Image (cartoon, grey):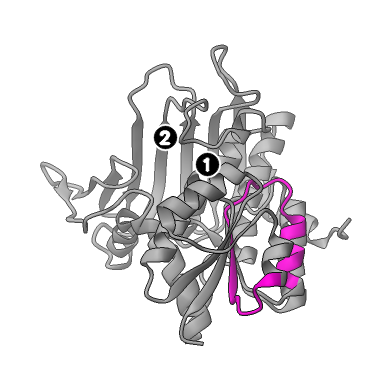
């Protein structure tokens, strides 16, 4: 196999980026579109080229025996039948985050893939941002020492009615946590190279929110390597201008990221000002997604270790579920215990 022939299921906002990225890849080819919406299929043919089109994944896989992999850019609810089909056909899966809207259901899907002996990767594209890789490099090179504590702020007015955005978050439970914070929590694990131990969290919804459930998250995480992180996130900021800052205080200085895609700086203790880190040009939602697809292709075509695996994703999802429990019960939640308990539960 010299090239991956990929079925793309889901042609919403994220699916369109996947179509563009697959088309640009030298290692992959877009073999077919799957979406229940005829208009979405029609638009994809115009924008990304003429390909076989199907309204469901079952028909696509039945009709195209030469397929090598499936990309699921579908909403996180209702994926079980699609994942079962991929397992039945022994097709590797690359799935948009979050895998599902509960840790238990996500664990069930991971076990399904393991039983079928197929790779399952989760599209955690924030790991592949240039600014993320540069932050990790700063830490590994010991420029400012080891991380000790961090403060992560993400404040955004997200107008969920905009045509370019998925609509399902408007009605889902805990949309900020499952759709946005999952990226941020995963980044903490990835960059600090450690696992979470506990969290105390409060979630709520401001009176003006257009979302059905909580869009505000405030949490304090403790990690196994001693790092403590305070987190503040919202999708319903009362100001339309976004605010992002991820500051990490280390043993010899600080790392400060001032934009979710760029503006990385550092300083040592007695420096008079921050030093900026030069980053490669970045095409929003394309460059990072290309990194995800390249990692997936390298695993399948060149036998490199699978990155951002389904099992690894469960550890980030445990942080989400722990936040929900903590907010509901007003207590500190032990994350490893929650993780182990959930994975030991029988599938239903």
Q: How many marks?
A: 2
Q: Is residue 341 above or below residue 293?
A: above
| Residue drawn at point x = 51 percent, y = 77 percent | 4
Image: magenta residue range: 63-87
Marks 2 and 1: CB-CB under 8 Å?
yes
Q: Residue at x 47, y 57 (%)?
A: 18
Q: Earlier in the sequence, mark 2 or mark 1?
A: 2
Label 2 element class: strand
Q: What residue is disc 1 on?
A: 181
- Disc 2 target residue: 154
The residue shown at (56%, 34%) is 176
Closest to the observer, 138 or 98: 98
Q: Is residue 165 left or right of residue 342?
A: left
Q: Is residue 9 magenta?
A: no
Find the distance from the CA under tag 2 to the CA under tag 1. 9 Å
Say what secondary structure mark 1 lies in: helix
Image quarter hosting the C terminus: bottom right
The answer to which image quadrant residue 309 occupies is: bottom right
**Extreme residue toward the top, this view:** 207
Residue 144, given in percent of the width and then of the height, sits at 26, 57
Would you call the spot at circle 2 few (<14 residues within 10 Å), some (14-19), or many (20 or more)?
Answer: many
> How far across and down, in percent of the image, does residue 50 sit?
48, 61
The percent position of residue 111, horizontal first and vertical second, equals 76, 67
């Amino acid at each position: 196999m010299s090239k991956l022939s990929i079925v793309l299921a889901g042609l919403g906002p994220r699916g369109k980026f996947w179509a563009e990225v697959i088309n640009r890849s030298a290692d992959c080819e877009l073999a077919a579109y799957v979406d229940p919406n005829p208009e979405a299929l029609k638009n994809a043919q115009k924008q990304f080229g003429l390909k076989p089109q199907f309204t469901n994944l079952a028909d696509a896989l039945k009709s195209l025996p030469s397929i090598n992999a499936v990309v699921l850019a579908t909403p996180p609810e209702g994926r079980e039948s699609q994942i079962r089909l991929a397992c039945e056909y022994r097709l590797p899966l690359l799935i948009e985050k979050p895998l599902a809207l509960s840790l238990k259901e996500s664990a069930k899907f991971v076990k399904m893939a393991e039983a079928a002996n197929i790779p399952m990767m989760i599209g955690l594209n924030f790991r592949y941002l240039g600014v993320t890789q540069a932050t990790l490099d700063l830490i590994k090179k010991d420029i400012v020492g080891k991380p000790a504590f961090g403060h992560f702020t993400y404040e955004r007015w997200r107008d969920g009615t905009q045509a370019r955005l998925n609509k399902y978050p408007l009605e889902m439970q805990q949309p900020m946590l499952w759709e946005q914070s999952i990226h941020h929590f995963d980044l903490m694990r990835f960059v600090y190279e450690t696992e979470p131990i506990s969290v105390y969290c409060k979630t709520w919804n401001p009176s003006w929110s257009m979302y059905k459930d909580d869009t505000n998250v405030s949490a304090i995480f403790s990690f196994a390597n001693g790092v403590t992180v305070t987190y503040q996130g919202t999708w319903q900021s009362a100001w339309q201008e976004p605010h992002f800052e991820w500051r990490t205080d280390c043993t010899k200085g600080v790392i400060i990221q001032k934009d979710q895609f760029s503006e990385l700086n550092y300083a040592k203790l007695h420096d008079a000002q921050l030093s900026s880190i030069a980053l490669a040009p970045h095409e929003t939602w394309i460059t990072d997604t290309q990194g995800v697809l390249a990692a997936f292709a390298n695993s399948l075509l060149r036998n490199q270790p699978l990155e951002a695996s389904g099992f690894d994703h469960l550890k980030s999802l445990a942080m989400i579920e722990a936040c929900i429990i903590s907010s509901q019960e007003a207590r500190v939640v032990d994350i490893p215990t929650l993780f182990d308990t959930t994975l030991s539960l029988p599938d239903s």
